[in-house]
Image (cartoon, helix red, strand yellow):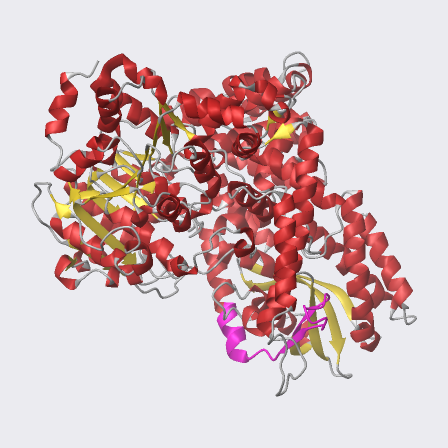
Amino acid sequence: MITQEFSRLYKTLNPAQKKAVDTVEGAVMVIAGPGTGKTQVLTLRIANILLKTQVNPENILALTFTEAAAHEMRKRLLSIIGHDAYRVEVTTFHSFCNNFIKKHQEEFPNIIASDSINEIEQLQIVESCMDSIKLEILRPLGDISYYVKPVLSQINELKRENVEPSAFKKALLDFEKELKATPDLVHVKGAYIGKMKSVYQKQFKDLEKNKELLKVYESYQKKMLELKKYDYNDMLLEVIKKLVVNPYLLQYLQEKFQYFLVDEHQDTNFAQNKIIELLCNHFDNPNLFVVGDEKQAIFRFQGATLENFLYFKVLYPKASFINLSENYRSTKTILNATHAIISNNPKSTQILSENVSLLKKAKHLEEKIHIAKLSSVDAEYFWITEKIKKIIKEKPTSEIAVLARTNRDLFPFVTIFDSQKIPYIVESDSNILDDIEIQKFIILLKTINKNIKDEFVAKALLLDCFRIEPVDVFKLMRKRYEEKKSIWEILLNEKIKKELNLKSKNTIDKFVKLFMDRDDGFVKLSRNSRFDKVFVEVLNKSGLMEQILQKKHTQEILSRFSRLYDEVKEEVGKNASFSLNDFLKYIELLEKHDVSLKPTTHIIPDGSVRLMTVHKSKGLEFDCVFVVNVYDGHWGNQRKRGVKFHIPWEMLSIRLNKEFEEDENSDERRLFYVALTRARKNIFLSYSIFSQDGKEQIPSQFINEIPPEFVLDEDTAKFEKKLLSHQEMFLSLSEDKKNSDNLRFSKDYIRELFVRQGLSVSALNNYLECPWKFFFVNLIRIPETIDDAGLFGNAVHGALNRYITRLKTVKPTEKFLLKSFEEELSEQPITENEVLRFKKRGIEALKGFYAERLQNINKDAETEIDIKGIRINETLIINGKIDMIEFLGTSGFCNVTDFKTGHIKSRNEIEGKTKTSDGNYKRQLVFYKILLDKYKNGFYKMENGIIEFVEPNDRKKYVREIFKIEKKEEDELLKMVIKTGDEIVSLAFWDLRCKDKFCEYCKLRSFLKK
């Protein structure tokens, strides 16, 4: 049975590896660092068990962390033991549990009689539960859905830790009892005597949040039973519960499997460990072989913790520990440098093995780790690109990997590598819905849907697959805006189309027929056919498929469409009447809850640079590794984001060992360690000293943890200089630059449109954010949906306008104000539920605002002052609408007020002095000063500009910030306004894009290319 291949491979093993392969009896833990041959050891050990014992292949269970790892192990086994490899149970934890449930269906009625659900269905159930429960903390008024995803995440974590609602409830009661009994709960002296200490106030607040989480968890489990559903984690939990209460089932498994192997044990969670424990509990020292490396534990977000890894040591004190310390992958420089870095995690590195560097066995020439400091993000990406261009002249492209902390770090390389003709593959778990071709397809589907909206029709007209002249689309959009008609009314009106003198009228008519034909148009098709058929028909008949087949990365794009179609087929399989409308609602839910549809497979063409996240690179190796954006705050010292629940794990007998608790940087350092140990020969680390938005950056502390003797600082001066002549790599819209001469548009039409329309402050702010946002929103007037926050703001502004207008004749009452608000709110296009929610929010805010501010407004105040046509030069006029002007006497001196709803900004935020602020509010006030100075011969003399928040802050206070506009500010903004006007008139922005790599308007611009 055992082949010559086993003997050959066994001879190549080092002493530690041979010991791991030969120790076939008892509990064994192998600490296998990167490049130490763990997969080889695992597969040879399975072969050796079959050689030395009487067990059959079916009596061996090998559990892996991923399907890919299971596939790789079985493939290697095939080469060693032949077809018997198919009889060995090599599987993931979830597949093992799933198969076990299928074989014993009668024991799992809750699972077998139910359907599995995906993440979006889980979120829908959580949201439904939260809607039906009275919650204070988890349903904030400003965003009642804010906690939905974090709550599901926490429920999943509790399940991964094998914590049911009853156990969680007991833990919270115990924690509350202990907290209340704390001796130093309150201050006994000083200014806060008798008051609870802030540290305990926070713990009580966390407790209340956890109590609400418990309510949702209980409701979620109940709802799942009612709906006959189960989620991903339920399979493990159900198997655990059944094995605990049913000794016969446990005995069945223990009789079937005599040998157990677990790969990547550092990545297991508590529930997975419980499965292992139950399977092995009939022996004090079971035949259990686990392989892992505490230095590579990077999946904490999936429930893996160091404590779970250490669990083995406590459970099996007789276990043998074998340390694989000989590395067959990397240079000595890389091994010593990475050892120095990970040594700064003393708790994890000294738990299971001596903290010594791996020994070099690979025969590579030594080279120092290259570190590049660049002036900007663009310079950094340019430096990496130039380095790769040089390297691929000497070695295979597939031996180069660019590793990143996040998927977003990778996307700029797509544009750059395309422009430089560098072959590449992006192997990220990014959302397929972010693919531009899929976004085009979804725009088509939204245009077809019976709940048709102008904004989608407008975008569909711009899609390059229809080959409609962009200037014709611009004319149609403006006509729609001027005539106050729907876009379909314009498209179906032959007289209007003739008046517009459209160059591509025939093509536009084909577009209309494609969608609206009574016999086989898309709209009719969507109403009379199954959606899976609609999907295929629209993809083919629209011309989108033809266009995809002509692209460079055709296979990759088609695989994403295939993934989306698989999702459609699954939904149609569940519900034969699944419609286009259902699909679009499904997509909306994905977007609402920020849920990704991840690609199932990656097609890796030969000779491609591999672009991936570090998490994705686990288990891979390359000659050359580039790690990008290695700056502080991105790699290490990350600002905590998102919602945090503080679960009292100590009350659940989970994660008890405080000695091994580590900070966030320890996790980050392990991730960095994994990144660097992917390299065989060369490592290139880079960072920029200024971010994309101009903020200063310093290198990650992990760079400074590399001893100087292993580092080579790159001379980047020549790259910085060379970049000056290659800016188009970053500013152009992918392939648009080379095609811009062929892009048919009328500069005269756009120039004339701007000269006639002019510039408002909102248009200016949009231009500064992104010229294409200005172009589509303010100039062409592409239809856009106002979000709920904007509709609420409209209702509040409408009520204030009514109040101030009425003030001229009679002093309005609070009742009048609130009634005005309700009437304005009823006119907004929102659901009844939203009306009720916003009504409560608005009435509470306006009652306080009436008492605090409105009663003091002068009856001479003017509201909604619409100023148009203020000429700055022959090609530029400016316009604006001012919320309120209050006169300070009879000589025209006045204060200008702009009312704001929503987030209360600080004075520094208003002025654009904080990291995340844009200064739009202050710019608005300065712009109004320029307007008023030139309006009615300067009658209005603006003393102050006021930003007035209509809603109170967290302390229930109403905030107004008053600004005296200085002459210098006015002059500077006027220069900016003139410069912006000149750029718009000359279309200087046409081949450029903004700094936001994910800007929807730049993406819309890319639809125009031919």
Residue 90 at x, y percent in the picture = 36, 24
x, y percent for residue 889: 77, 84
- Considering every residue shown, the one lying at the far bottom of the view is 190
Which span of residues is magenta-colored?
946-974
Q: State the residue in front, 831 or 361.
A: 361
Residue 968, magenta (yes or no)? yes
Question: Taking 141 as reference, is 861 above or below it?
Answer: below
- Asked where in the image residue 886 lies, by quadrant, the reply is bottom right
| Quarter of the image that includes the C terminus | top left
- In this rendering, would 823 be left or right of 145? right
Q: Quadrant of the N terminus?
A: top left
The quarter of the displayed image where residue 646 is located: bottom right
Left or right, residue 698 beside residue 221? left
Viewer-nearest residue: 995 or 975: 995
Residue 264: say if magenta. no
> From this viewpoint, is residue 894 visible?
yes
Eyeballing the image, is 905 above or below 84? below
Q: Residue at x 25, y 24 (%)?
A: 49
